[in-house]
Amino acid sequence: MYTAEEVITHAVAAAREWLNAQSKEQRHSPHPQASRTTSPREAVIQTDAAWKIDTRTTGLGWSIRKTGETLNFQSVNCFVSSPLIAEGLAMREAVKKCKELGLRHIRLESDSAQLIKALRSKLEPPEIYGIISDIRINCLAFETVYFAWIPRAKNSVADGLAKQALALYQVV
């Protein structure tokens, strides 16, 4: 059982983490990485998560664009303790779906600067170590993989899917 102080402290920390993960890169650098042209044979996957602190529930959304078609997916997870974990779960589900679809060349995009930084570096935050490991292991199935940060405004499809999944779960 948690005390009221513990719940409030965790809520404030999670809200701060969410805000930092979503807007830090946009404030300091409008282009946090060198631009890279997408190859015509490369599938572009955009991921996002919507997290509800009071129920610790997250909606996950991802969109896969390849050779003129777009596939949209969404799911819900419970007992998720932070926004960063939620973002990682969305990316992990997207990677698993790409593997299932037999894609060979993928570009994974997210508006979570913290997640992309963790995926592109050797040092990942302890809270998502297992999720990052799962993503990296699943990525061994692809010939090429590229992780890219995108502004929130360019991630509206995945964002809408995540919010919709969370809203539908709340109704049930």
Image (tube, rainbow, N blue to C red):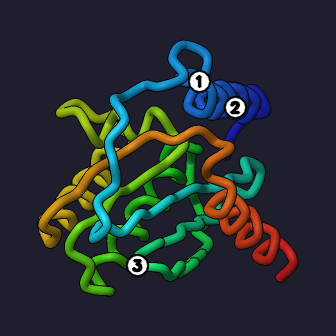
Residue at the right extreme?
171
Q: Nearer the viewer, mark 2 or mark 3?
A: 3
Hey, which quadrant is residue 128 in on the image? top left
Does label 2 or label 1 sit earlier along the sequence? 2
The spot of residue 129 in percent (x, y) is 29, 45
Mark number displayed over residue 15: 2
Q: Quadrant of residue 124?
A: top left
Mark 3 and mark 1: span between their CA atoms? 30 Å
Q: Three-letter amino acid code at disc 1? A: Gln
Label 3 crowd bin: few (<14), some (14–19), many (20+), radius 10 Å = few
Q: Residue at x 38, y 79 (%)?
A: 97
Please state which amino acid type lies under the numbered disc 2: Ala
The residue labelled by disc 3 is 67
Q: Disc 2 versus disc 1: distance between alpha carbons?
A: 17 Å
Q: Which residue is mark 1?
A: 26
The label nearer to you, 3 versus 1, is: 3
